[in-house]
Amino acid sequence: MQDLKNKRIALYARFSSSMQREASIDDQLRRCREYVVRQGGVVDETLVFSDAAVSGASLQRPGFEKLMQVVDRKPSGVDAIVTEDMSRITRDFADSARIFQQLKYLNIPLIGVADGIDTSEKGAKLSCTIKSLLSDMYLDELRDKTLRGLEGRALAGYSTGGLPLGYRSEPVKDEYDRVIGHRVVLDEETAPTVRRIFELYLQGRSLESITRQFNAEKVPPARAKTRHRRKGWVSNTVRNILHNEAYIGTWKFGQRQWRKVPGTNCRRPRPRDASEVIRRVYKDRVIIDDATWAATQKRLAEVRAVYVKNPDTKSKRGAVSGRQNAYPLSGILFCGECGAPMTIHGGTNANYYRCVDQKKRGTCHNKLSLREDLAKRRLLDVVEQRYRNPDAILYLRKRIAEKLGELSRQANAELAERRGRLQRTEEKIAALVHFISEGDQSDYVRKSLLDLEAQVKAEKAAIAGLISQATMPIELPSPEFALRNLVAFRRQVEEDPVRARENLRRFFDQGRLHLLPQPEGYYVAQTKFYPMAMLRFLEEDRQERRRFGAQNGLDHRPGGLWSRESCAGRI
């Protein structure tokens, strides 16, 4: 058992389902606190982290991310981590191995109170591997059982989850008054909204026109009564309703399979084979008659034929080409009135940014447009003015010097550690060589010698890399140097707007600019500006130059074609 006396102990707790009790977190933490006290430790409440109703299949959890930020501090903010069991940390096999290696490298033990695992003990790797594999298999089995249960409900005609607008569910009970499922029935409150959408569309109304009318009339949108409620109608919602076969009584289950992107909480749909899709027809669920449905699908097809690509891939008017967004400010500009994104809309002579909630929903009062080319030019001018300020250059030089000092101290410590390991390994090699010279020719000794020689080679390569990095010249920016790179940045905005957009995000707080409309008819941009973001751009530009030089046989070492006169840190 770990002796936790005089150590900084972090606690972590998690439960995965919103159906579980909130007290589950408190119960886990109580058990962890009792363990820490028994081992002579004291719990610092600032080092208690938790995640409620978050799956353990991903590491993207606010509480866990804060914990790992504390762990990664130099020196580390914790000496040990205590949790109820390893499945609270993660249920993913690959994530478990990565966390184990990271904490092992930082010399921070992870202790599971219930399963008795302590990563600082011998044999912990095997026990952690088995535990994480079982947890991963548990998730697979849970998915299969959940899918099997949903398929059974679909075959029995019961609800399998979220219902389209116009329907609701009511419980079905057996003779013992136990709920055995939920029957899908028409919702007389929202079904008229569905019929009205089809009627308006057949009258020649556009999707956007229907959307704006519903928002103006404050018609409750789909999922208005659920925790996934939306703040208004959008044209995509209307389009999906017009395409949904459920309204003519044809219900399908299992058309798509949702897969979680590894390492994230994002899920992406994948189409399933047609043979696996459960299809049922229910005449009692019909909201739209066959004639209305056929007329609607005909008009949808006619509209689609006008606004999508021709078979020869030449786009017709208004068609979406499928290419990447070529506007460097898209995803950066946000409406200061309602907080919605500003999106591009075409004008007669130029493209304009408009509030998406005002344009699509009509729920925002900000009708002011902003020319895309003007916004881009003014923003780059302001960024350039910031770097023309001598105080900004002095600030950058100071921050770079501080960072170099920090990196130099870290590199010195790592270099000393690696040199020590190298010396100890070479001493082991010398002992084995002496052992062999005395007559021991066993395969085990020879294999050990080969392993140690490989370790020496790896340590020498790492030491050489650290020394090379430490002697690499680094330029402290001057006003001329900063402006020269701003010219390169402007060129990137024109030639590679997608990459430029990601670089621009780094200059602003949360990667956003909030545009506040003024009564005089112009915008005032509001954000926090981070001048150190330019260093990231300079480093990427420098790496690009090195790659170009290597590909074309150019020398980028000090004194070569790509060298820059500068001061350099030394180890």
Image (spheres, rainbow, N blue to C red):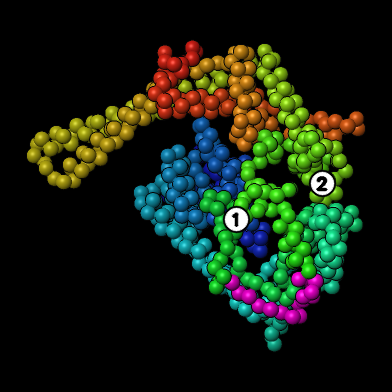
Q: Tell me the SS state at disc 2.
A: helix
292 is within the stretch colored magenta: yes
Q: Amino acid at mark 2?
A: Lys
The quarter of the picture where the C terminus appears is top left
Foreground mark, 2 or 1?
Answer: 2
Position of 124 compared to 310: left or right? left
- The label number, if any, that marks residue 359 in the structure image: 2
- The label number, if any, that marks residue 267 in the structure image: 1
Q: Are marks 2 and 1 in contact (CB under 8 Å)?
A: no
The residue most toward the front is 312
Where in the figure is residue 139, as x and y percent of width and height?
A: 52, 62
60 is within the stretch colored magenta: no
Where in the figure is residue 472, as x and y percent of width and height?
A: 44, 19
Q: Tell me: residue 438, above or below residue 473.
A: below
Camera-side residue of 258 and 434:
258
Q: Amino acid at mark 1?
A: Arg
Q: Tell me: residue 472, above or below residue 499.
A: above
Which range is magenta?
Answer: 277-294
